[in-house]
Amino acid sequence: MNRTRERVVRLSDGAETLVEQWGERGPLLVGVHGLGASRRGWARIGEHFAGRYRVVAYDQRGHGDSAHVRDLRFARTVRDAVEVAAAFGEPVRALLGHSWGGAIAVGAGREAPVERVAVFDPMLFGAENVWRDSVMVQYRNLLAPPAEERERAIRAENAALPEVEIEAKLHAGRRITLEAIAALGEDNAIDAGGWNFRHLLRDYPKPLLIAVAGLKRSVFLAEDRAYAAEAGGPNVCVEVFEGASHSLQRDAFERVMPVVEAFLEG
């Protein structure tokens, strides 16, 4: 693994997060992971770009080595992304984000002095009661078995993936708690309709690549796609990868990365 260094970044409310870097030279990319993941979810992309870009990623609140940190309100987590991007004191070529982290990257990209934003299947809308009826059920089932049994299941279910992806999933799974998943839903009133950030796409002020799965496996809904086309403006590009899953940067890596690379090069 080409991981080069880790550092702690102190956020404006006093919380801290651990930031990890892959690559030693080239423009800076900042990754924002999704629900139930951790900073290590960007390791494969970091290794892929090593020598051309430096990829840095941090643990979102309630996740990874920041599992004890709370306040998962959208505005606070957007502020975290802005502050991590600013912590390096140099220009950032792009914010990268996936799912929940994709929505945060879209929001932070409007504020942070970054050149462009690339997101994978961003979750810009949450239907009423989706947290109670779907997300919480999924994570209760996932976290119910003992840790060793969960890790065996992660390895078995992801055996077709490279070891770097499996290790990322194991790292995230060792730290995530049901309380953190519940807090994200509660802090943002998702079951009451409080998660709707499509409006962040309107007249987007810088180049934005939205890479998404086909509709049947995507959380970037038909309504999101229509809104992006109607209101996003000339900077917004939606690329669909049929047959890929919600985690298309993982299971469609060879198809997705050339598109991302071309976007990063402008």
Image (cartoon, grey):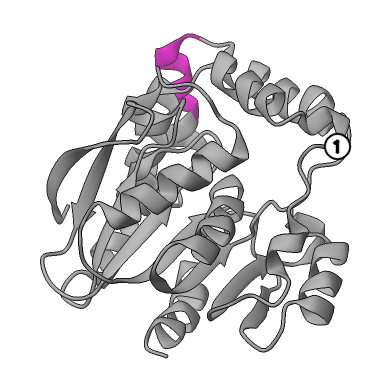
**How far across and how far down the image is residue 3, in percent?**
16, 51
Quick check: 261 left or right of 22?
A: right
Q: Is residue 221 visible?
A: yes
Give the quarter of the figure containing the C terminus. Answer: bottom left
Start and end of the magenta stretch?
146-153
**How far across and how far down the image is residue 142, in percent?**
60, 22
- The residue depicted at 37 percent of the width and 37 percent of the height is 59
Tally of marks: 1
- The residue depicted at 25 percent of the width and 43 percent of the height is 19
Read off the residue under disc 1.
193
Q: Is residue 250 visible?
A: no
Say which element carries label 1: loop
Q: Is residue 235 above or below residue 171?
A: below
**How far across and how far down the image is residue 110, in percent?**
54, 65
Q: Is residue 250 above or below residue 94?
A: above
Count residues near mark 1 (Cα–Cα under 10 Å), then give few for <14, some for 14-19, many for 20+: some
Viewer-proximal residue among 165 and 226: 226
150 within the magenta span:
yes
